Amino acid sequence: DAGVTQSPTHLIKTRGQQVTLRCSPKSGHDTVSWYQQALGQGPQFIFQYYEEEERQRGNFPDRFSGHQFPNYSSELNVNALLLGDSALYLCASSLGTGGNTEAFFGQGTRLTVV
Amino acid sequence: AQKVTQAQTEISVVEKEDVTLDCVYETRDTTYYLFWYKQPPSGELVFLIRRNSFDEQNEISGRYSWNFQKSTSSFNFTITASQVVDSAVYFCALSEGGGGTASKLTFGTGTRLQVTL
């Protein structure tokens, strides 16, 4: 049973560019959440997708957008990259959106903006 | 607003010592869930435990134990007889308990545990 898979594992982009990160949820899970983890910090919630719609959003600008596909996989897009966007981006999947759901995390995509 | 505080940035212990990681939380909800995750160098967050706000019973799982006290808004994590493999960053997290879009996790800043021989 495959867990949460993210691609790519590492990425280097230049300021101003756009980037797309991908996530496949754990088998049977229908909800995907994205988190940004800056170096030395805890993960910060970006947004959550359920039934192909953004259900909840954290305090991130509109440069951060996402999508969920019918097979529950998800993409995170970041436009006009800034140096401060350099971070580990984690995807978490769960079954449903209740507060008691256990979220399973992928290994993340390490994004470096130069 | 939800908030999780892990005041201990880094802890170093010698193998076989016991160690407690502190977590203090803030929430206005009466129903909420608390979590602990372990993050090894590989980056993946590994789920350790979930506790709901109505269950203050402490839990023990092998060398791990958790102490949940609503009176002090704390959810502390103790590793007994620590091992080198326990070296990692540990995160405490909180989610609201309502239905719908309630599974957003609010994390603390983490505690880095270094266990040496």
Image: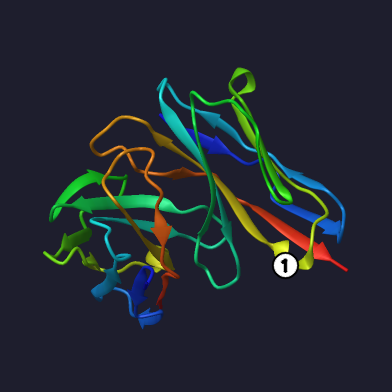
State the quadrant of the N terminus of chain B. top left
Q: Say left or right for B87 vs A91.
A: right
Left or right of B83: which side holds A49?
left
Amino acid of disc 1: Val
Q: Where is residue A24 in the image (x, y as percent from the top left)?
A: 28, 70
**Nearer the observer, B100 or B62:** B62
The residue located at (40%, 24%) in the rendering is B31
Q: What residue would you read off at disc 1?
A: B85
Of the 4 image quadrants, the one containing the C terminus of chain B is bottom right
Q: Residue A87 appears in which quarter of the rendering?
A: bottom left
Label 1 is found on which chain of the structure?
A: B
Query: Is residue B109 in view?
Result: no
- Dot 1 falls on a residue whose secondary structure is helix
Relative height, residue B51 to residue A30 (above, below): above
Residue B91 place in picture, x, y as percent: 57, 50
Residue at image coords 30%, 69%? A81
The picture places residue A15, in percent across and down from the top left corner, at 32, 74
Q: How many labels does the image show?
A: 1
